[in-house]
Amino acid sequence: GKVKLYAGDNVLKSAENIEIPLVGNKRTNLVFSGFQISVPEWDSSKETVPGESDGWITITEPEQLAALLMAGTTESIQVKIGSTLNMEKMPQDVKNKIVGKSFSSLTLDGNGLTIKNFSAPAFFANAAGLTVSNLVLDNFKVEGNGHVGTLVNTLKGRSTFTNVTVSNSSATTSNGAAGGVVGYIVRNTPTLRSERVSVSFDNCDLSAVIATGSLTDGKFVGRLSGYDNGEV
């Protein structure tokens, strides 16, 4: 098929068949086996949550996703992933700011796209009333002090997960429960025995995911708990 080579926004060559020289080249990152794609450095100036359009916030940059995770919100918002997001270059100070943030009534539509190479103590640290769909997580490493999950550490109340795939990932804690998707599920009001907790996983798939917790661990959920067994 037709191939185009780019330098920035400029097309260098467009042809049906292109011979790629097997010679190392520092400027183009050509290596002996073909192309080596470098990951752009983190740009802190992009750490801002985009405005809404037609009721949706569309995330197209890793820095925008980080800004959302650092901000937290108790407002009902709808977020859509607009491109594959490689979080490999996320700096440590950003990772630290994600811990402890809370989300409530958040809808996240992954658009069938992938968030990859994420390593931090949490993605959603605390959440309630999540609706997550059409999302792929690849090479996530969530390691923290307390309950941990690749997507949510502690989840309260009712939530739904539809068409969510997690692969090549791990959730690890030495002081709590660990789950392949969610670490710990509890009532919104732990002492309210009449409150029903409803969390559904529809057409979700986990592949090469390891959950390791000191309390309990599970494939999708590390622990489902409440006031009746003395936990808060």
Image: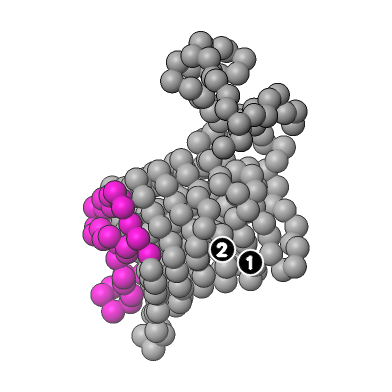
**Whole-number angstrom distance, CA of label 1 to CA of label 2:** 8 Å
Mark 2 surroundings: few (<14), some (14-19) or many (≥20) residues within 10 A: many
Q: Does the magenta stretch include residue 76?
A: no
Determine which quarter of the picture holds residue 185.
bottom left
Tell whether label 2 touches label 1 (CB within 8 Å): yes
Q: In this view, does 186 lie to the left or right of 71?
A: left
Determine which quarter of the picture holds residue 155.
bottom left
Pinpoint residue 56: horizontal percent, then vertical percent: 69, 64
Q: Using the image, tell me which numbered label, if any, was put on residue 35.
A: none
Q: From the viewer's perspective, is residue 215 above or below residue 203?
A: above
Q: In which quarter of the image is the C terminus?
A: bottom left
Residue at the spot x=62%, y=62% of the render?
A: 79
Q: In this view, does 175 lie to the left or right of 71?
A: left
Residue at the spot x=44%, y=68% of the render?
A: 161
* SS of the residue under disc 1: strand
Q: Using the image, tell me which numbered label, if any, was put on residue 78.
A: 1
Instruction: Give the mark nearer the N terminus: 1 vs 2.
Output: 1
| In this view, the mark in front (1 or 2) | 2
Residue at the spot x=72%, y=68% of the render?
A: 55
Q: In which quarter of the image is the N terminus?
A: top right
Q: Which amino acid does label 2 sit on?
A: Asp
Pinpoint residue 73: horizontal percent, then vertical percent: 62, 62
Mark 1 surroundings: few (<14), some (14-19) or many (≥20) residues within 10 A: some
What's the magenta region? 204-232
| Residue 227 visible within the image | yes
Quickly name the residue at label 2.
109
